[in-house]
Image (cartoon, rainbow, N blue to C red):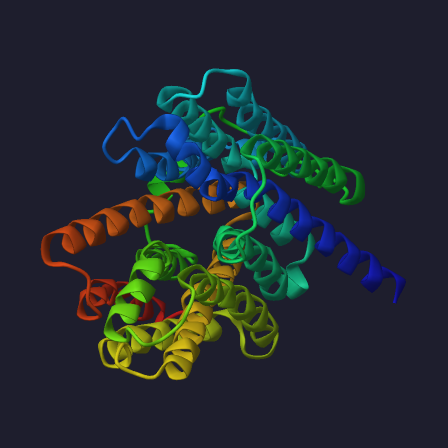
Amino acid sequence: MLASSRINGQLLVVVFAQFAGTSLWFAGNAILPELQPLLKATAPGLTSWITSAVQIGFIAGTLLYALFAIPDRFRSTYVFLISVTLAATINLLWLLLPVNAETILASRFLTGFFLAGVYPVGMKIAADRFKPVLGRAMGFLVGALVLGTAFPHLLRGLGGSLPYRTLILSVSLLAISGGVLLMLVVPAKAIQSVGNFFRFQTLRSLGKPSAFRPAMLGYFGHMWELYTLWAFLPSLIAYYRLQHPDVELTNSLWAFGGIAAGAVGCVGGGYLALQVGSARVARYLLLTSGLCILLLPFLVTAPPWLFGVFLLIWGAAAAGDSPQFSTLVASHATLDNRGSILTLVTCFGFLLTVVSIQFMAWLVATVGLSGWLFYVLLPGPILGVLAMRWMR
């Protein structure tokens, strides 16, 4: 009983540290409305670049962290603390400098770069310490990330506001406190990996048949859909309002509900995975999200209650399979390069989201938004299910 309580307590600390660290990512979304007048929107598309800078930095960071095997060559809790401290410090530095596009873009990029030692490394810590209940543990971890994604929409929807300097300072201190608490409460595992300083073979291993390859390809299919759905969900809700001008609803609160439902899908899927296995849960949720895409054009004419329920189901399914894919990759990767593989798979998954989002943005600008346009997301769930068909 005492051992179980201790494990659960450590899991809560890992989840808190993960949420606190990744909140650095989403704080940028929350302060964008206040930054726009200060920047005077001098550059076309500047707002979208501020949003994308963290993601591009994260892709660059995860690639280098993986190729230099940082998550495997050093104790994970130390990597987490140092990375989150650097990310939080850089997140604060631009407050001391003139407010201009160059400073903010550089700060956001470097913040994302060092978050490469937070999100994937947090998953490695979970894989090292909570293997018997890894699907559930990953569900909580990714659920915390999803809630962080949804939070700016809640903040806008409720009309709440804080001075952007206060918000940035608070989030940075929260992130560092999470890293310190993690190092103090969760014992560091002994280093399992030694060898070459630079591991290009880790990158080559992604293209070869392996035990984790089906889960990796399924994850890529999932990522093609998820972040594009999140990015265009407010636009989809605005489109729904145009079809129903007599309906009173708040775009930001509905967007929060659709995204936050993913946290329920992550946690619920984690508990279900203990009964039926992570592979089966991931396949079911991929099928559900694919079905939601197919039904979307017909549901934009549905009454608000039905459309709202539909968004909750789609949001839960689209995000809920993510922790199970991470569980499968971590479980089937070899112990000496587990951290690097998780980091590298995450890197390419996020790179795919950039392609998907930009493709969708081009289509919206070219032909205009509609429910049918979301069919471009269908290849993700379809190819993901096909890739997973042999995994048990």
The total number of labels drawn is: 0
The answer to whether residue 280 is left or right of residue 79 is left
Residue 257 position within the rendered picture, expressed as x and y whole percent measured from the top left: 48, 66
Q: Does 232 appear above or below 334?
A: below
Q: Residue furthest left?
A: 366
Residue 287 vs residue 37, the one in the foreground:
37
Quarter of the figure with residue 314: bottom left
Residue 314 vs residue 127, the one in the foreground:
314
Residue 228 in sight from this viewpoint: yes
Residue 207 in sight from this viewpoint: no
The answer to whether residue 285 is left or right of residue 243 is right
Q: Quadrant of the C terminus?
A: bottom left
Residue 128 position within the rendered picture, expressed as x and y whole percent measured from the top left: 65, 50
Residue 91 vs residue 110, the one in the foreground:
91
Q: Quadrant of the N terminus?
A: bottom right
Q: Residue furthest front?
A: 246
Q: Residue at x 56, y 60 (%)?
A: 143
Residue 67 position within the rendered picture, expressed as x and y whole percent measured from the top left: 43, 31
Q: Residue furthest top?
A: 97
Residue 46 position within the rendered picture, expressed as x and y whole percent measured from the top left: 30, 33
